[in-house]
Amino acid sequence: MKGAPEAVLSRCSRIADAGIVRQLTEEDKKAIMEKADGMASRALRVLAFSGRPMSLDEPLFLSEVESKHIFSGLAGMMDPPRKEVMQAISLSKEAGIRTVMITGDHRLTARAIGAELKIGNGEVLEGADLEKMGESELQEKIESVSVYARVTAEHKVRLVEALKKKGHIVAMTGDGVNDAPALKAADIGVAMGKTGTEVTKEASDMVIADDNFATIVGAVKEGRRIYDNIRKGTSYLLSVSFAELATIFIAVALGYPVPLLAAQILWINVVAEEFPAIGLSLEPAHKNTMKRKPRDPKESMPSPSLMAYTLGIAAAIVAGTLGLYMLALQSGQDLSYARTMAFVGLGFFTVYNAYCSRSLDESIFRINPLGNKTLLLGIACSIISILAVVYIPFMQTIFQTQALSRESWGMVLGVGLLVVLVAEVMKRLLPGLR
């Protein structure tokens, strides 16, 4: 027989001592448990072994087979955490993710492993402690205790439900059949792909192929990157669309001819705007991605702060586009030239906007300018598409554009900096973007 030292000792009446079998005394039990505790405190998983001789003629009743055993000894096994786990737990802590360890191991083993991984404050609760607690007491303890030992399947479910009642989003990992109820009760059940049973995998929402905790943290980082890029792309596309509508509406309301033709708007929407959008969707995770607290799952998308940022950028694009258009008309240029100014201005402001949208919380001047080569390629394609409309003769005819002078290009590029200025100011004024 093998098992937890206290469980095995309760079924032993004798001990093998230096080859001699003698009666097991209370002093022996105390010495064995002290030895087991010492091994457990060194983060060893401890198993006790025992046996008893039986005649083949004896009836094999469970009560007889598991009683009157001869204690044989203890074995300690070390299952050291992977090197990357320490870094993963530290990274998750920075990200506002709390790691809780729930194990069937001895209290001292759990405490030693928890200390090694820097989980919790050293306090450990056992399953027996949980059984004595009422719901209110558990609700108080659940926030301060992060290590649980000698727990059963029922205890795991109770812990998951207690954390959910406190408002936490709970992800539970497991590999055994007894983990399945807790995985089902958690918001996100995560099964181990290599060691996990089929029951566990069926009860889970996700399966980790390499059984590595660091993979879960990596998945969180990737999820944040994807969500961030969705927010960036949403803001970028909406701001350009709002700007196009507002530019036409305001110009007509002020008595000016329509500043942008339908073909010009279509070209910006379908061609010039889309290349940078593809690059934005592939923006890599930034250094502060895992240093932010988790977002509120009830937060709308786009959030109020993101809409404020989007409208602010749209207003800057409208101001710049209308300013170039009106200035061209007032300087004596014909309507075709003024529309070309508006078209080129809107196109280049869109490019400025795309680059500023790489981060909604960091200054664009603090980000590696070559960190997203796909976006740079998209911006280059967008600029080429705008230049093609302005300088290729047959496209000039289709889109009713004219070649711009150097002075006009200087004005377009200079006024475009207004978009960058507004983006930088709003990133500072809207902490909700972070």
Image (cartoon, rainbow, N blue to C red):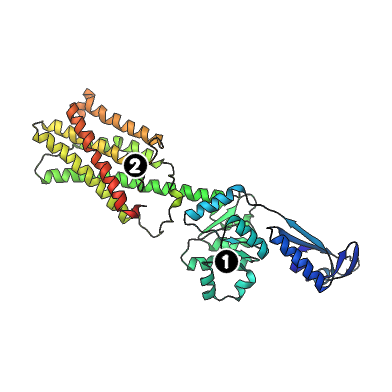
| Mark 1 residue element | helix
- Measured along the vertical axis of the image, is residue 162 above or below residue 209? below
- Left or right position of 70 against 94: right
Residue identified by numbered label 2 = 364
Q: Quote the CA–CA distance across marks 1 and 2.
A: 46 Å
Q: Is 134 or 429 nearer to us in this picture?
A: 429
| Mark 2 residue element | helix
Q: Position of residue 316 (x, y in %)?
A: 22, 44
Quadrant location of the N terminus in the rendered image: bottom right
Q: Where is residue 241 in the image (x, y as percent from the top left)?
A: 26, 44
Q: Is 172 or 248 nearer to us in this picture?
A: 172
Counting residues from the start of the chain, the first of labels 1 and 2 encountered is 1
Q: Is residue 398 at least partly visible in the picture?
A: yes
Whether label 1 touches label 2, CB < 8 Å: no
- Left or right position of 252 against 28: left
Q: What residue type is labelled 1?
A: Val
Which numbered tag is attached to residue 157?
A: 1
The quarter holding residue 103 reads bottom right
| Residue drawn at 27 percent across, 39 percent down | 350
Q: Nearer the viewer, mark 1 or mark 2?
A: 2
Q: Position of residue 154 (x, y in %)?
A: 61, 68
